[in-house]
Image: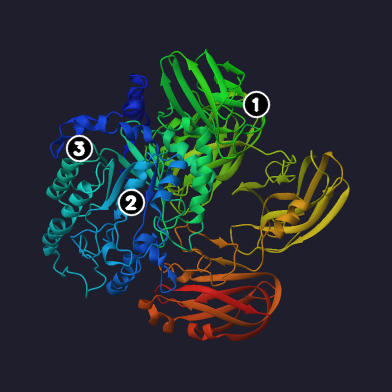
Amino acid sequence: MVPKTVFFPRQSLLTGCILGALAIPGAALATPAMDSAANAALMAGGVDLSATRDERMGWFRDAKFGMFIHWGVYAMWEGQYQGNDTPRYAEWIWNNGRIPADEYIEMGNQFNPVNYDPKAWAEMAEQAGMTYMVITAKHHDGWALWDTPTSDWGVKDTPWGKDLLGPLKDAATDAGLRFGFYYSQSLDWGNQGDEGGVHWDKSYTEYGPDKSTWPERLEQYHAEIARPQVEELTTRYGDLDIFWWDMPKSITDDQGQQLADILWGNQPHIVSNGRLTGRNNAIDFGDFDTHEQSIPAVPQLDSYWESCMTMNHTWGWRVSDHDWKSTTTLIHNLTGVVAKGGNYLLNIGPKPDGSFPQASIDRLHEIGLWMDVNGEAIHGTEATPFLFQQAFNGAVTQRKHDEGTTLYLHVYDWPSDGELRVLGVGNDKLSAYLLADDKRSALTVNRDDKGVTIAVGGDAPDPHSSTVVLEVKGELDIFEVGGVMTAEGMILRALDSQYDGAVYESWDNSLSNWTADQGPATWSVDFNEPGRYAIEMLHGNLEDAQMALSLGEYQTELFLPATADLRMGRKHRTPVIVGELEVLKGGEQTLSLIPTEDSGELHFSELTVKHLPDALQRPDGNITLNALSADYAGQSEVRRGARHLLEGQKETFNWMSTITRQAGHFDAVIRYQSEQAQQLAIYVGEQRYDFTLPATGAFVEPLDIHLGQLNLSESGATPIRMEVTAKDTMDFYGIELYEANFFAAAQAEGQQLSTQFPIARAAYSHVDNGQHPQAYFADKVLDGNSETRWRPNIKKVKQRWFEIDQGEAVNIKTITTEITAPKRNAKLLEQLTLTVRYQDAKGQWQTLATLPVLKANEGFSVDKAARLWRFEFSEQRGNFSVRRVEMTQ
């Protein structure tokens, strides 16, 4: 889905969305307001959808958390065709893999999910705190999960041969879950739906080259497949709660109306998402909006909505996608969505045998444990009342009652000093307790002119998100305040800034296409005392850029690295440290973010002023010596969170480490980037340690190099000093001191606390071709595993090269590659050549051999000693993969 993007000046956004919600306290939060067009009579199946919407949506408004299930024939392919991962989502494999129809249909005819246990599915959903389920009755491949008489393309003609939907509906009802179906109403490859059906296989498609005949073919599909199947789904399974349309494509107004009449004529109480019709249609039948793979940056209070998201990077099962979101991330997503007024629909992609992936099971279980304690703060709650600022680093939900309001403070970063600062609360009659505390022991609450401070104690009740309950007597009083430094830092959003000339975009809370001629963004800020801080930014720009930051008389430059997505990685939002701030005096003052001629065109969403970490021993026994937190008097700039050291300048970094638990030996791991080898000295007290750092290569990503052991023999404070005179330039991030037993245990368990050579680096291409952001560097070997194969960017043929770094000079006798291409690109391998180069002792690249790829796959002699090896490909266009490189010593 392409998001609907609306541009607002800040004032009109606040007036139209947020101030409207505040005009009648609580009303818009409980029931999102619809505009006049939406409130006009909208008929379907004899039901006035506008008039009945709030009543029908009652359960959905309170549900908050549901399970999405993507399952079908595509699961049998496991995201791979002819041994290669297909691009993008796994459930699109028939299309994206351009698989011939007879092969795909034959695979479907073998479907036999012997481990399908609908009762177990429903129980896992219920135990995770989910309240509703949605399953793909038919996805874009057209394969039906029930025994429809409309088509032979479905479960009935398989070894399983039984309806998959009815048993799951019954199990969901038994578990107390609401239930509904996903249905792809127009895009249907197997049944010759929209967009030419299986257009890549001319022997199968019923669409001819004359596109003027396609509307007639689409109507035939709707008459013979879509409308009869929706009739079946809405009459065969009793009462349904939700219907989830997808991909309207070329659907006409009449076709949309006919499907809506069937749906609400048979299920007058059902709710539906807004994808039955599309942007080109006159009528939107949707009861709620869909945010696919994204969470709005700010609360959305003017409509019902749902955020549907995957656990890894694909909806259907992909055997090679092991990049699972952590339980912490999933819980933060859940609380963040609910706090902004939506529901969270979390996807599971079952395996072809009907079982859930173990990683999904584990996360559902862990979420369930969290919901057992914190479910009260999710189900039946309303969106945050903090509409003008982020009150602290976390999320807020609320529950109104006769005596006042219960605020649930979902705290992501537990304050190290045990004092939770909550900005913008103006009430006096307050009490607080921890939701995890069965005794509900009272916490001390103090109020000042900026908000309240709650004495929550030193240890977080939960490692993912802890809930502090703040009870407010009487009408809730929330006021706008920002720019206050708390234990978690100071968060300055684009929404909260004052600006003149820039354009605010509500979709991702950003000043969009921001350039130098549009002027600065400013905030009123309040620092308690002078000090140094790191500046972290969430931004989007396609090339490296610079901005200026000023605070009073102080001004500094910020260096913004290029991001792979101008829209700030809508699905992978990652902030970056871009500079540092020197606060010369405490008190209220103005902070300005200023685009310059070197800024280019960028999107800016959020800036965080962060405390620099102390060199204090943590509970795990380890110590972080951050480059930015060192006592440092040099002139180096901050880039990507590192000190950018210039050639010939002697630099000294000082830390006062504090041993609170266990003195002794620590394994030191340094993070840095440098194209030249570097010499440095580390002093622990008066004891000196000398180290040589190898060059990391011409890549922006750093290495984590294990230096050896340092002896911190005494408890208490110990001074640590690092001295280095850079050769060329060096980016220094910091040093991690791992307690020796901790380091040894981690190594024994296979954890990589430092870089393990050899490593593979690729230029501007995916090293793992799942749904990952663009990667420049991968700390892994090309070993034949589908996770680590390298697929070059075919649009940038001159950048089709990668390197293998052995870590030190190694004499290589032979090299054997495994380079493959999809069947349709088989001729490409006959044309493709590979040039192998190595870097000599002087740092110069020398050509070793140029040979056909097919010859390289057979293996060839080398007998050369080098550390760095580069593999470059000729410029023939086409899709190929490097699965393995075997370098024999």
Secondary structure of the residue carrying numbered label 1 = loop
Q: Is residue 42 left or right of residue 592?
A: left
Q: Amino acid at mark 3?
A: Pro
Instruction: Answer with the quarter of the image where residue 880 lies.
Output: bottom left
Instruction: Answer with the quarter of the image where residue 438 lies.
Output: top right
Gap in angstroms between the C-alphas marked 2 and 3: 23 Å
Q: Is residue 885 above or below residue 747?
A: below
Chain-order first, disc 3 or disc 1 = 3
Q: Residues within 10 Å of mark 3 (few under 14, many from 20)?
A: many
Gap in angstroms between the C-alphas marked 3 and 1: 64 Å
Residue depth check, mark 1 versus mark 2: number of the one nearer the observer: 2
Which residue matches tag 2?
167
Chain-order first, disc 1 or disc 2 = 2
User: Which colour assignment does the render follow?
Assistant: rainbow
Foreground residue among 755 and 591: 755
Q: Residue at 66% of width from left, 26% of height from top? A: 529
Asked if one can make out residue 323 in the rendered structure from this viewpoint, the answer is yes
Q: Amino acid at mark 2?
A: Pro
Label number found at residue 610? none
Tell me, yes or no, whether the two marked residues, 3 and 1, touch with CB atoms within 8 Å.
no
Secondary structure of the residue carrying numbered label 3 = loop
Which residue matches tag 3?
268
Which residue matches tag 1?
585
